[in-house]
């Protein structure tokens, strides 16, 4: 049935948890594209036949107007016209079905890509420049390129506005935060001091410094 | 920010006349931007003034640190600074997210394009190019000729039907500062007239109160 594969693709995206990506389903994607090509192959000859039928109808009508025909002949030409009109209608309906299925497939494909692109953009807010391995293998090559371009665009805006936009995602209650370091990061230059971030160390840092590490999972906030 | 009205910006007298400080302006701009379904006008003056004041605050905080003033005072100033920075960052972030959602529509409508700041316009252009390129590469180049536009479903469509537009008839909760009297809601066939009183909360479709929000008479909550 037309359109079934495309709706499978969309359902697969919808069934993931929001904010998570599944591997880019290249097979299904190419199958839908092939279906579109098939529709086009059907559509083109149909359009040509429609054009032919319309021309025939015009000729019939013109010949009726030019020659004053007798009753018999007019009845025959009416019958001819009816036949052509029926053929025209069935071709038109066929063409419409193919056109609408093609348009639906296009919508499904674009929705799939568009929504995945949205999830990728949200990742760009959390991560600085490089995506973690597990996520990178789920993206297609075009999506990886898009991610790089998007991060570059964001960074150019950030540098123009001169304000770091990915800190302070939550309204600050306290200028300083107590954090426990989960990964070995080593010596880092913070806004007012140089700190040695060793694993399992408990530190008292400025919120704006610590937030980046917290979103990446390298530090944990101690709320007690 | 309430305390440093005396830090000498020329807009001060005007502000005290209206009895709104920068903090109030920021809060209402931030709230409006978060609640409105479409992007609102960019307040250039507010941002410029706030940047100057933030710089002064930072210098003051540094000085206090060096002079060893009571750490409580320093942390209060720091807190004030942080909260203002949060408002500014969140405001810019919300605007960016709205741009990302509706970029093709914003590019088409001149009125909405003029609501962006210069840097946001540059961002929007680059972002639209990125997205178009990505869509082209993955899908559109592989489709037949007449279906390759990213704005229209096919060459036979009469208008750009693949462009998402902000939903202007979502309901928003709003409050007016002054008594605005009877106001006409365009509800299509029914013409309802409502009385808008000061400090009363109303839930109305955004489309009806759009002009009031733009002129600043109504605040969204």
Image (cartoon, rainbow, N blue to C red):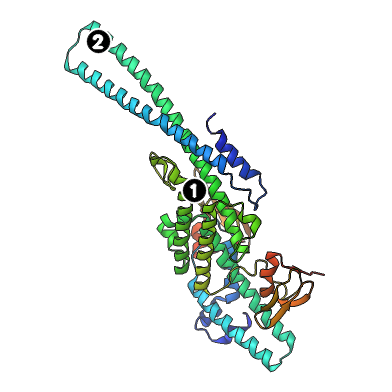
Relative vertical location of residue B221 with respect to residue B88 in this rendering, above or below: above
- Name the quadrant of the C terminus of chain A: bottom right
Residue A213 versus residue B91: which sits nearer the camera?
A: A213
Are labels 1 and 2 on one chain? Answer: no
The residue drawn where x is 44% and y is 68% is: B118
- Using the rendered image of the protein, determine whether residue B122 is visible from the camera's viewpoint: yes
Mark 1 and mark 2 in contact? Answer it, CB < 8 Å.
Answer: no
CA–CA distance in space, label 1 to label 2: 56 Å
Residue A218 position in % (x across, y down): 71, 67
Label 1 vs label 2, nearer the camera:
1
Give the side of residue B59 with respect to residue A150, left or right.
right
Residue A33: image x %, image y %? 49, 39
Disc 2: which residue: A74
Query: Looking at the image, which residue sits at the far right?
Result: A224
Image quadrant holding the N terminus of chain A, namely top right
The chain holding disc 2 is: A
| Residue located at (60% from left, 58% from top) | A122
Which element carries disc 1, helix, strand or loop? helix
Above or below for B135 versus A170: above
Q: Is residue B71 left or right of residue B15?
A: right
Q: Which residue is mark 1?
A: B138
In the rendered structure, the residue with mark 1 lies on which chain?
B
Q: Residue furthest left?
A: A67
| Disc 2, SS | helix
Residue A39 versus residue A137 in the image, above or below: above
Q: Residues within 10 Å of mark 1 (few under 14, many from 20)?
A: some
User: Where's residue B199, x and y in %?
Assistant: 63, 63
Query: Does any portion of residue B38 appear in the rendered image?
Result: no
Q: Residue at x 53, y 34 (%)?
A: A3
Disc on res. B39: none
Give percent across and percent down for residue A51: 31, 27
Q: Residues within 10 Å of mark 2 (few under 14, many from 20)?
A: few
């Amino acid at each position: 049935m037309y359109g079934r594969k495309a709706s499978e693709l969309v359902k697969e995206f919808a069934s993931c948890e929001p904010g998570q990506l599944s591997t880019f389903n290249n097979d299904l994607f190419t199958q839908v594209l092939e279906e579109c090509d098939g529709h086009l192959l059907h559509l083109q000859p149909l359009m040509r036949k429609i054009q032919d039928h319309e021309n025939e109808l015009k000729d019939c009508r013109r010949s009726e107007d030019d020659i004053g025909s007798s009753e018999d002949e007019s009845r025959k030409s009416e019958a001819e016209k009816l036949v052509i009109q029926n053929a025209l209608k069935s071709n038109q309906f066929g063409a419409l079905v193919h056109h609408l299925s093609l348009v639906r497939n296009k919508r499904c494909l674009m929705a799939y890509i568009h929504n995945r692109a949205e999830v990728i953009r949200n990742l760009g807010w959390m991560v600085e420049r490089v995506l973690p391995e597990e996520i990178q293998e789920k993206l297609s090559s075009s999506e990886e390129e898009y991610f790089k371009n998007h991060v570059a665009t964001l960074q150019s805006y950030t540098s123009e506005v001169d304000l770091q936009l990915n800190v302070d995602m939550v309204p600050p209650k306290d200028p300083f935060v107590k954090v426990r370091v989960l990964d070995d990061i080593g010596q880092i230059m913070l806004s007012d001091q140089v700190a040695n971030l060793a694993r399992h160390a408990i530190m008292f840092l400025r919120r704006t410094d610590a937030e980046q590490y917290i979103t990446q999972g390298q530090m944990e906030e101690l709320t007690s | 920010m309430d305390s440093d009205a005396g830090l000498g910006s020329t807009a001060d007298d005007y502000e005290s006349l209206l009895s709104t400080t920068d903090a109030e302006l920021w809060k209402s701009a931030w709230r409006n931007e978060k609640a409105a379904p479409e992007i609102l006008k960019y307040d250039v003056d507010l941002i410029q003034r706030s940047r100057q004041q933030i710089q002064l605050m930072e210098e003051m905080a540094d000085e206090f640190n060096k002079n060893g003033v009571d750490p409580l005072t320093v942390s209060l100033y720091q807190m004030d600074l942080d909260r203002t920075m949060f408002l500014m960052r969140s405001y810019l972030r919300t605007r960016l997210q709205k741009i990302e959602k509706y970029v093709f529509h914003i590019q088409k409508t001149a009125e909405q394009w003029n609501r962006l700041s210069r840097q946001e316009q540059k961002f929007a252009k680059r972002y639209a190019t990125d997205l178009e390129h990505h869509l082209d590469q993955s899908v559109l180049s592989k489709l037949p000729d007449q279906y390759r536009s990213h704005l229209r479903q096919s060459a036979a469509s009469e208008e750009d039907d693949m462009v998402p537009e902000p939903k202007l008839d979502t309901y928003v909760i709003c409050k007016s500062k002054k008594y605005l009297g009877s106001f006409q809601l365009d509800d299509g066939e029914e013409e309802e007239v409502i009385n808008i009183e000061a400090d009363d909360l109303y839930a109305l479709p955004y489309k009806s109160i759009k002009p009031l929000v733009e002129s600043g008479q109504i605040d969204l909550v």
